[in-house]
Amino acid sequence: MATHVLGDTTVLTGRSLRHVTRSPDTIITTAIMPVAMMLMFVYVFGGAIDTGPGSYVNYMLPGILLITIASGVAYTSVRLFTDLKSGIFERFQSLPIARSGVLWAHVLTSMVSNLISLVIVVGVALLMGFRSSAGAGPWFAVTGILLLFTLALTWIAVIAGLTAKSAEGGSAFSYPLIFLPFLSSAFVPTGTMPGPVRWFAEHQPVTSIVDTIRDLLGGQPVGTGIWTALAWCAGILVVAYVFATAAYRRKAA
């Protein structure tokens, strides 16, 4: 049974990835907005923002990476919505394939395409002066956190794709996710914020994730912060997965 599910998921993922490779503009578009924001913050606002020692591009890169992911998962929602409206889901249900493979194909495609976008953004950051003293271990940890965060947001995208009434509505869910890093420590220290905003910034998931990635890339001790970041990612993932599978069952009923 497990081999059957794995085989079906692999085939369906290959189909979904072919759609992406035929329209690479989706990956390029996903990377363009974060890169443009990075250029603007570093070269326009960076000189006016005091983040302590070190270059500003080092400080704000973790937040840009999360925005890249939030922007990229919107395409997962649109692709899923398009499949639903085209009737391909009904054809899949008439075939002897694992139903879970249909959703996981979109999820795995999101993981691959977002990973490519993240590599592009990091490459541009290096050209802008980003440098890290972290060794292989911290880099693997950062990659793991980003992949877990991508997985969590992708399942939120699945919910949007399954419940949206239009393609535009399917992608609109990503706007609050893109905006959330601006209300965190991603671009400025939370200590500069007014009381209520500071409280929210310090207790929302993006701040703990950004701070953990920043410390890992800077070769700083992360302490218990990494467990808070992982707990946020895992919690979002579990809740989103439960709601996504419930929405899929209703669609397949």
Image: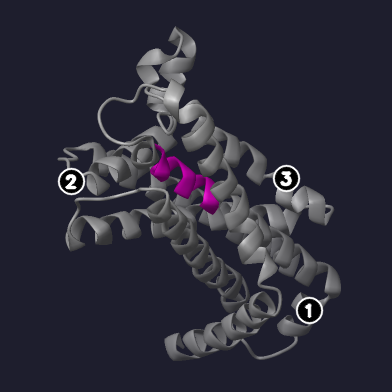
Three-letter residue code for mark 2: Gly
Disc 2 crowd rating (10 Å Cα; few below 14, some 14-19, many 20+) is: some
Which callout, 2 or 3, points at the residue further toward the start of the chain? 3
Say what secondary structure mark 3 lies in: helix
Residue 158 shows in the view:
no
Q: Is residue 55 left or right of residue 3?
A: left
State the image quarter where residue 227 is shown. Answer: top left
Q: Look at label 3 and name its amino acid.
A: Ala
Residue 174 in picture, x, y percent from top left = 64, 45
Above or below, 19 relative to 213:
below
Residue at image mark 3: 172
Q: Which residue appears at 73% of the width and 45% of the height?
A: 172
Find the magenta span and give its range.
60-69
Residue 235, how many percent across, how many down? 41, 46
- Per the image, the residue denoted by label 2 is 219
Q: CA distance from mark 2 to mark 1?
A: 48 Å
On screen, residue 117 versus residue 147, left or right, reads right
Residue 8 image point, x, y percent = 56, 87
State the image coordinates of residue 61 (x, y, percent, origin top left). 41, 44
